[in-house]
Structure formats: C-alpha cells, structure tokens
Image (cartoon, grey):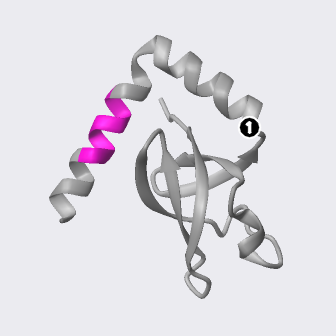
Amino acid sequence: MCLGIPGQIVEITDTDRMTAMADVSGVKREVNVACVAEADPATLVGRWALIHVGFAMALIDEAEAAATLEALKHLGEAQETLEQIAEGEKALS
C-alpha cells in the first residue's frame, strides 16, 4: 500500500532542484516539490502537501492535513512511518 503523509513545507532549499524542507509531525525532511510547484516555489512555504517517498505529491489544506494525520495516528501507520523516516535521517548523518 502506498502511503502519503501530510507535511508542511517550511522552506525552499534549492530552487533549481525544486527541493524544500518539509516538517512531517516534527521530523524535518527534504522533499522534491516539482509535482506541486507554482511559478514561484517560495509560495509553497507554509502550505501542506501529501508526501510520498520524498516527493510532495499534492497540496492539501490544513484541515485535511490534520484529519489525515489523526486518522493515520489511529491506524498506527503514521508512527511506524515516522520512525522509519527518523531512522533513515540518522543513517544519513
């Protein structure tokens, strides 16, 4: 099953590579925003997106992000995925 986790874009890290830093439930991760990019990628800062394998796949509103995170929390999938992201970040350090 593919799982998109809501994350908030907190900064654009490289406009040429179309990458940004996203906060996914307190875990910061660099993601590619080419799929959701607008004319000026800076307009994405503060926006919510569904993130899957390092790509922001779709923009969503804050209410949808909160509802999705709550549903995933109840299913237990979000915690497992966030732990995997954190472990991946540690391995890269």
Residue 40 at what x, y percent from top left? Answer: 79, 78
Q: Residue at x 78, y 40 (%)?
A: 61
> x%, y% of residue 87?
21, 46
Q: Secondary structure at mark 1?
A: helix
For residue 57: magenta? no
Residue 84 painted magenta? yes
> In the figure, 75 relative to 4: above or below?
above
Magenta region: 80-86
Give how far across and how far down residue 47 sits, in percent: 72, 53
In the picture, residue 90 is in which quadrant? bottom left
- Under mark 1, the amino acid is Glu
Viewer-proximal residue, 61 or 2? Answer: 61
Decide whether the magenta segment is chiefly helix, strand or loop: helix
Query: At 83% from the left edge and 78% from the top edge, which residue is drawn?
Result: 39
Q: Is residue 79 above or below residue 74?
A: below
Is 43 placed left or right of 81 in the picture? right
Furthest residue toward right: 39
Q: Which residue is mark 1?
A: 62
Q: Residue at x 80, y 71 (%)?
A: 38
